Image: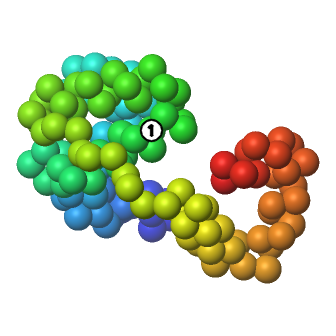
Amino acid sequence: MNGSSRQAEKGDGAASGGGLDRGLRALVRVSGAVAGRDQARLDAVLEEALENRPRDVEEVLVQSYLFVGFPSALNAMARWRRISGRPAPPPRTDDPGLRLDRGEDVCRRVYGDQYERLRSNIAELHPDLDRWM
């Protein structure tokens, strides 16, 4: 049995969330519940996140449409509004062009010398995917 298996059996370490603080664990659970489409579970983890990281839940739910589709993301956001009682934030007023520049800069830093190759490969799949990335 390797060390990570022993940690998982003991209930400590990353397998049980021991490597994550309580707030981050709550956000991970929100993501999982949105993807799992279990409404009762989603309500429970949204309440947990409300106690731990309410400001970050907005971003998790907005980003979830990329992975679970718009209907599931909209449903999750509606449940969050009901559970949290928090109103929607004001719309962003920054320049979308600046977001594009910042996104390209982050992507370039993350992928380093593979950045240009990545962009080329994604553009070959579909140019809109490259632009959105």
* Three-letter amino acid code of the residue under disc 1: Ser
In the drawing, does residue 126 fall left or right of residue 72?
A: right
- Residue drawn at (55%, 66%), measured in percent from left and top? 98
- Residue drawn at (30%, 40%), measured in percent from left and top? 30
Badge 1 crowding class, 10 Å Cα cut-off, few under 14, some 14 to 19, many 20 or more, is many
Q: Is residue 69 above or below residue 45?
A: above
Residue 102 position, x and y percent, is 56, 70
Report the number of numbered marks. Answer: 1
In this view of the protein, can residue 10 be seen by the observer? no
In this view of the protein, can residue 92 be seen by the observer? yes
In what element is the residue under mark 1?
A: helix
- Residue drawn at (42%, 23%), measured in percent from left and top? 72
Residue 55 position, x and y percent, is 21, 53
Colour approach in the figure: rainbow
Q: Looking at the image, which is closer to me, 106 or 15?
A: 106
- Residue drawn at (23%, 64%), measured in percent from left and top? 21
| Residue behind mark 1 | 64
Q: Quadrant of residue 46?
A: top left
Residue 22 position, x and y percent, is 19, 58
In the drawing, does residue 84 fall left or right of residue 10?
A: left
Q: Quadrant of residue 20?
A: bottom left
In the drawing, does residue 52 fall left or right of residue 13?
A: left
Q: Quadrant of residue 116?
A: bottom right
Q: Looking at the image, which is closer to me, 11 or 100?
A: 100
Residue 28 position, x and y percent, is 34, 48
Q: Is residue 66 above or below residue 107?
A: above
